[in-house]
Image (cartoon, helix red, strand yellow):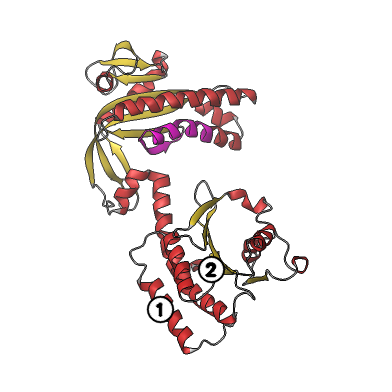
Amino acid sequence: MDAPTLDADAAHRDNDLVHWLTNGTRDERFIDNIFAELCIRLQQAGIPIKRASLHLLIHHPQWLGARILWEDGMREAEIARVDYDVGERSEYIGSPANEIHEGATEVRENLERDPATGRKHAVFDEMRAKGLTDYVAWPLYHTLGKRHLVTFATDRPGGFEEEHIATLSNLLPVLALVSEIRMKNRLARTLLETYVGSHASELILAGATRRGSGTTVRAAIMICDLRGFTAISDNWPRDDVIDLLNGYFDAMSEPIARHGGEILKFIGDGLLAIFPLSEPQACANLLRAVTEARQAMTALNESNGDTGRAPLNYGIGVHVGDVMYGNIGSRARLDFTVIGPAVNMASRLEALTKQLGKPVLLSRAFADSVGSEFALERVGEYPVRGFNDPIELFAYNG
C-alpha cells in the first residue's frame, strides 16, 4: 500500500521507533516481549492501538504456529499455540489470517459500520463487542517467501487516521527482520531439542560442535527395545507401523522427560536415555519413569486390543556408570551421543530380558544406587557378552 506523507514530527517519531526496534532489542531473545514493548511504545507515541497480534508459522513437531496477542494494559503478551489442523476450523476459515495466507496484501475492516455490510467472521464480532472501531492486518514477509501476519486494532472513534496507518506500515519491514531473527534462533533451538534433547541442544548451541569434543558423565543409562518389531514392520501397512511406533515412543518418552531423563536417540524401535547422576535422585527417577512407562504401555496395549492389534512387548536394560558424552562421527556429519562400556552393558541387559523373560533388568551397580525404596527381584548371575565376569542381575516389576 502507498503510505501517506508524514510531517516532520511524525517522521521523527517513526525514526525513534525504528531505531529502538533495530538497536534497542539486541539483548531480548523472545519476540513476544519485543512485540509487547513495541505496542506500548506505539501507544506512548500517540498511535491509538488497543489490540495487536502477531501470527507466526513455526512448524514445531506438535503445532503449526503461534499467536502472540497484546491488548491495552498488558505488560506481557499472551502466546497461544496453533494446531496443524487449524485450516479446517471455523476460527480460521474466512478469517483475516486466511485472506492474508491466500495472498491478500492488506485486510482493513471498519468495525463501526453496519456488520451486515462488512466481512462476516466471528473475530470481527468479538472486536465490535469489545468496542473496537477499526482493524488492519498485513502480511509480514520473511526470507524465501515466508508470509506471517501482524494485526492492529483501535477503539478510537472514526478508527485509525491515515497517519497512524502510515506509521504502522512503515514499521513492518523492520518488525519482519527482528521477528525473523528471533524465529530462526527459536527454530534452531527447537530443532536441536527435538532431535538431540534439551541438554545436548544447550551444549551444541553453546559451541560444543567440534568432532571428538565431549566430557565424561556419570549417569544411569536406560535402553529400551520392542519385541517382534521386524515381523510387524514386514506385515503391517506403513501408516499403521508409524502410528504404532509413535504410540509406543510416547508411552516411553513422556515419563522419561517428566522425571528428568534425556532421550539421546531413537534407534529404529529402540531408544537410549540417560539420567545424569548430578541429580541425586537420578536412579530413583529412572525407575519412577519406568513405572509410569509400563503403566502407559499397558493402557496402549488395551487400546490397541480394542482395534484388534496384538499387544506390544518390550525389554528395558538399565545400568549406571561413566559414559563419554559428546560429538562422534565423520568430518561432515556428527552425532551427539554417549558411548562407553556402561552403555554396552545396558544394551546387553536389554537383550537378556527376552532370554530371561523379565521385561526390566537392572545391573547390581544400578540396584545398589537405588536403595530400598523400590522392590527389586534378584534374578541371579549371568554371563554378559563382552564382559569377562558374570553380572548379578535384578528384575523390576513395578
In this rendering, would 175 be left or right of 121? left
Q: Let me know if residue 320 appears in the view.
A: yes
Q: Are marks 2 and 1 in contact (CB under 8 Å)?
A: no
Three-letter residue code for mark 1 = Asp
| Quadrant in the picture for the N terminus | bottom right
For marks 2 and 1, the one nearer the N-term is 1
Who's the residue at 39% across and 76% down the image? 19
Q: Is residue 308 visible?
A: no
Per the rendered image, the range of residues in magenta is 245-268
Depth check: give the residue in front, 305 or 371. Answer: 371
| Residue 251 x %, y % | 48, 31
- How would you rate the neighbour count of disc 1 (Cα within 10 Å): few for under 14, some for 14-19, many for 20 or more? few
Above or below for 198 versus 372: below
Say which of 201 and 388 sits in front. 201
Residue 96 x, y percent position in the rendering: 64, 64
Query: Relative to 318, is 323 above or below?
Result: below
Tag 2: amino acid: Leu
- Is 260 inside the magenta-drawn segment? yes
As helix, strand or loop, the secondary structure at mark 2 comes to strand
**Closer to us: 397 or 241:** 397
What numbered label is drawn on residue 16? 1
- For disc 2, the neighbor class at 10 Å (few under 14, some 14 to 19, many from 20) is many
Q: Which residue is mark 2?
A: 140
